Amino acid sequence: MIKNISLHQNLKLKGFFIFFMLINFNCFAQFKTYNGFLKDIENNQPLAYVNIGIIDKNLGTVSDANGQFDLNLDDKFDSEILKISMIGFKTQTFKVRDFKEKILKDNIIYLEKSVATLKEVVIKNKKLTTNILGNILDKKTVSAGFVNNVLGNEIGIVVKIKKKPTFIESFSAIVDYNNYGNFKFRINFYDLKNGLPNNSILQENIIANSTIKKGKLTIDLSDYNITVSQDFFVSIELIEGLGEGGLHFLADYSGTPIITRSASQGKWNKIEDLSFGFSLLCKY
């Protein structure tokens, strides 16, 4: 029997509510919305799906397809650090009070491209082994998903490699139900620090769309040349608002625990009791 885990049910299920609910910093806080645009400084083109938020405070968002963002900020965060980041561009940081002053004067923020140094990978003349890494569900027990609908919300798992280098061919997850029709998301890969996601190991964004209603969702990654030589973290990130509770994946109580953060630049949390059926087809 498959269980559907909702926000309220999680209050009773081994602390799962940590995964689904946003941290409410202050129910009576007076937030003000700051609107702006993110653009490429070289060509003035809008930058879609840029992460922007206060570091480790679970208060952030993602720019839309036109580079526009709306971010709610309260004065009590004025001394905190706000981070703007996107693969392929230099990261920018601001004190929150400085960010607010800038946006009120000029609501366009320009990002500069970064130059990535690719590591050389030596491939010996041998036949590669194909294998599936990650969580392969052997029973269907839990249905869970993004009920917060907060842009930048990520869920993922740590994947342990067997040999190095390992080449990533595809990513898969099991959709229990999708009530949205088409949904767009980003797949992220990070290296690890103290067992938690650290820095992105990608050279370009992986933006995917799917209309799958139920069943195995597979994204071909062979064109992205993702090569890893140590254990890593893979996640699905919300980059467009979907509405609450309409997309669930199959999960289990065994396997590699999930790690999640509630919003862009937020704090990572490990949920020991829940494991999502995320897996990767790899060669090594």
Image: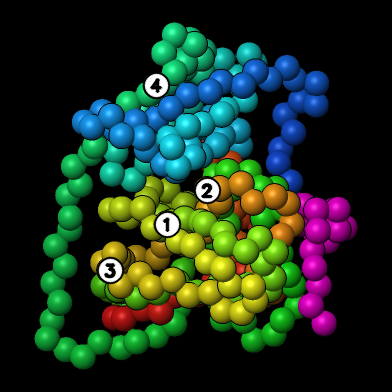
Residue 35 screen position, x and y as percent: 53, 23
Q: Taking the image as drawn, is residue 251 in sight?
A: no
Q: Earlier in the sequence, mark 1 or mark 3?
A: 1
Identify the residue at image location x=28%, y=44%.
Answer: 88
Residue drawn at the location 16% of the way across and 89% of the way down: 126
Give the mark, 4 or 1, whose residue is nearer the N terminus.
4
Disc 1 element: strand
Q: Amino acid at mark 4?
A: Ile
Looking at the rendered structure, the kind of residue marked 2 is: Ile
Q: Secondary structure at mark 3?
A: helix
Counting from the top left corner in percent of width and height, residue 235 is at 50, 59
Residue at image point 18% right, 42% down: 115
Q: Is residue 136 above or below residue 276?
A: below
User: Residue flagged by tag 3: what amino acid is it?
Assistant: Asp
Q: Which residue is mark 1?
A: 207
Part of the protein shown in magenta: 1-18
Could you tell whether 191 is left or right of 101 in the image? left
Cα distance in 3D space between marks 1 and 3: 13 Å
- For residue 74, which quarter of the picture? top right
Instruction: Give the x, y percent position of residue 277.
Output: 59, 74
Q: Secondary structure at mark 4?
A: strand
Left or right: 204 in relation to 155:
left
**Residue 118 shown left or right of residue 52 in the figure:** left
Circle number at residue 239:
2
Q: How many marks?
A: 4
Decide: marks 4, 2 in contact (CB < 8 A)?
Answer: no
Q: Which residue is mark 4?
A: 108
- The answer to the question of whether label 2 and label 1 lie on touching residues, with beta carbons closer than 8 A, is yes
Q: Amino acid at mark 1?
A: Ile
